[in-house]
Image: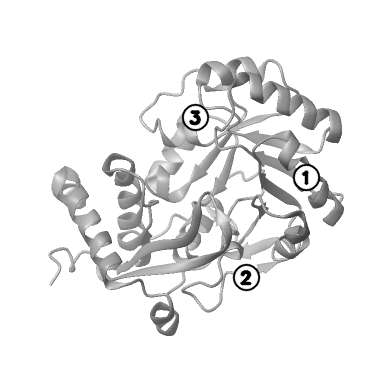
């Protein structure tokens, strides 16, 4: 018997194919388990090291062992997500986000990906557009690409997400471009930062339930950063998405559509129903995996062992002792 089985009850590792390759992922693996509060999910991307994974484990345990914060809304508005795909596939993908008023488009540069923006606007001329660069540009590339995007499309852009990684470049960029800048990686890779000068290089904070360390730490981050927040996901299964929705639904102010509809990028999910998109929104509710779907997407045994060992390593290197001590406080 796995030594942590009593804490991670019914741990089940699933492997769900994606409809397109998204951030290099074509099969999404996740470790699902339950606690006194319900089902939760541990799913840091496989290339992440132990230090990066620790907040994800904290979020997963919080989701399983603590009830949700008070919710101030019963449904959450979502954005569509458009990966870098062939132009012919754009209507097919965007049609999976019925009623969405905003679309986030993964881009590399202007030359290759401006047609994706054009195709999205052909699908819905009223779309608010977000470009997600994942920190892929240096300052010179960012200035050139964003100048061209602005010249061609004008004021359709709600914001540009993480155009560069270097804070110094973001500061220079913010003073030069007419678009707002949202930061994601700049938050996730610096969770212990004070963010004292964040308004010098960013306008919006992308906050994700799992990488932030759970709802409690995510709310602390939002307060510390002091920027309007967009609640988003990390290519979660329906279990993880439900926790992201709860985080969004607990916010006193929610002025942006949330990136919590990424189940539409999967070929399937572990829940049968409950998180469908209706008129651009998703209802907020606790969900449980369906037994048949768990069987359908069950990962091979060697991958289940890999995830158990991953959790065990983090737990035994100090995390477990700290977490157990917090439960006694």
Identify the residue at image location x=62%, y=28%.
203
Rendered view: 6 above or below 49: below
| Pointer 2 residue | 276
Q: Which mark is residue 230?
A: none
Gap in Å between the C-alphas at discs 3 and 2? 31 Å
- Among numbered discs 1 and 2, the one appearing first in the sequence: 1
Disc 1 crowd, CA 10 A, few/some/many (<14, 14-19, 20+): many
Q: Quadrant of residue 35?
A: bottom left
Let me know if residue 223 appears in the view: no
Given this view, does label 1 or label 2 mark the residue nearer the observer?
1
**Numbered circles on residues, count:** 3
- Among numbered discs 3 and 2, the one appearing first in the sequence: 3
Q: Position of residue 317 (x, y in %)?
A: 15, 44
* Residues marked 1 and 2 touching at CB (< 8 Å): no
| Pointer 3 residue | 225
Gap in Å between the C-alphas at discs 1 and 2? 25 Å
Disc 2 crowd, CA 10 A, few/some/many (<14, 14-19, 20+): some
Disc 3 crowd, CA 10 A, few/some/many (<14, 14-19, 20+): many
């Amino acid at each position: 018997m796995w030594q942590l089985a009593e804490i991670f009850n019914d741990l089940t590792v699933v492997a769900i194919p994606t409809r397109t390759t998204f951030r290099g992922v074509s099969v999404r693996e996740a470790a699902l388990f339950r606690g006194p509060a319900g089902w939760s999910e541990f799913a840091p991307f496989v290339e992440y090291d132990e230090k990066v994974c620790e907040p994800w484990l904290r979020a997963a345990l919080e989701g399983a062992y603590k009830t949700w914060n008070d919710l101030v809304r019963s449904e959450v508005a979502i954005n569509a997500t458009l990966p870098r795909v062939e132009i012919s596939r754009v209507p097919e993908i965007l049609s999976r986000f019925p009623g969405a008023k905003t679309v986030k488009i993964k881009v590399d540069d202007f030359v290759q990906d401006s047609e994706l923006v054009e195709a999205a606007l052909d699908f819905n001329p009223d779309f608010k557009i977000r470009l997600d660069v994942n920190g892929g540009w240096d300052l010179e590339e960012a200035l050139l690409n964003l100048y061209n995007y602005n010249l061609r499309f004008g004021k359709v852009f709600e914001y540009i997400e993480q155009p560069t990684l270097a804070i110094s470049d973001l500061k220079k960029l913010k003073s030069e471009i007419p678009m707002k800048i949202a930061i994601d990686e700049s938050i996730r890779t610096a969770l212990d930062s004070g963010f004292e000068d964040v308004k010098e290089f960013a306008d919006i904070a992308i906050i994700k339930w799992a990488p932030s360390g759970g709802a409690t730490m995510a709310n602390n981050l939002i307060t510390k950063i002091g920027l309007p927040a967009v609640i988003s996901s990390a290519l979660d299964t329906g279990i993880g998405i439900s926790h992201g929705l709860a985080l969004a639904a607990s916010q006193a102010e929610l002025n942006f559509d949330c990136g919590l509809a990424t189940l539409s990028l999967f070929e399937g999910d572990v829940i049968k129903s409950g998180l469908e998109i209706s008129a651009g929104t998703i209802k907020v509710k606790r969900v449980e995996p369906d037994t048949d779907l768990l069987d359908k997407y069950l990962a091979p045994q060697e991958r289940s062992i890999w995830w158990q060992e991953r959790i065990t390593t983090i737990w035994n290197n100090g995390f477990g002792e700290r977490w157990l001590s917090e439960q006694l406080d």
